[in-house]
Image (tube, grey):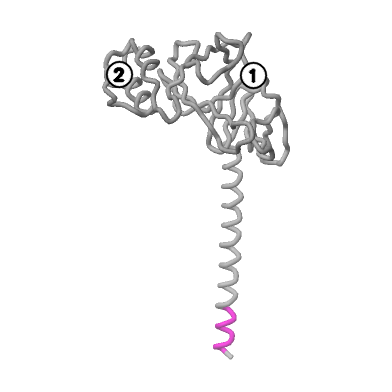
Amino acid sequence: MKILTSRIQQFDRLKKTSIFMLLVFSVYATSFAQSAITEDFLVLNSGDTLHGSVEYINSKRVSPEFYKKIRVTDENGKRRQFKQKDVSAFKADGKVFESYWLSQSSDKITLVNPKYDIDPENGAQYFLRLIRKGELSHYQWEWWEQGESTLMWMDLLRKKEDQFFIRATQGLLGLKKKVLTDYFMNCPDLKERIEKKELDEVWQLVDFYNNNCEY
């Protein structure tokens, strides 16, 4: 009888411990999910910042595209939608995008032209993915080709004082060396390394400029 009573007590303690651990895990999982949501944010032109889960890609189409209205859902499940023109930046899925109004000397944006002017009055709006911010900042312009589901992108660079971006790469052909050597005339060491093909990745250019060039 004593043995049976002892085993029943041990079972009760084990049961209580299991319930306690389950509660702890549930609280942790809920907190983790909430913190994951609050990592995303959306910044309005007014300066207001909204935290929550941000949705920006319409993936139901054959060729995905940015939603015309970007959605943000707060931790209480309330969803709000904002027109692209009212959004200055957002973070979703660990990626930060900033809004820029870009134009070129031609009537429309083309992938051939290496220079893209920041032109809020005459330009078209694009959300550029921020890769690195600094005296020389690195962005990527992402898009989907018509009828394709594969994400495409080009690398863009901008010095802090410039009111334009330059295209740093030319697809599979690598760096746009002539464009880059002209752009980095203010940093002879970087210009020389590009000409000698000692640097062949965009991140290397950005790292070298921010750490070794005079602004």
Of mark 2 and mark 1, the one earlier in the sequence is 1
- The residues colored magenta run 2-9
Residue denoted by label 1 = 45
Position of 66 with respect to 187 (left or right) is: right
- Magenta run includes residue 7: yes
Task: Please say if 77 is above or below 196.
Answer: below
Residue denoted by label 2 = 190
- Magenta run includes residue 151: no
Q: How crowded is mark 1: few (under 14 residues within 10 Å), some or many (20 or more)?
A: few
Q: Which residue is drawn at 49% across and 14% down?
A: 115
- Quarter the C terminus occupies: top left
Q: Residue furthest bottom?
A: 1
At label 1, the amino acid type is Asn
Residue 214 marker: none
Residue 18 in the image, given as x and y percentages of width and height: 57, 67
Tell me if label 2 and label 1 are in contact, CB under 8 Å. Answer: no
At label 2, the amino acid type is Leu
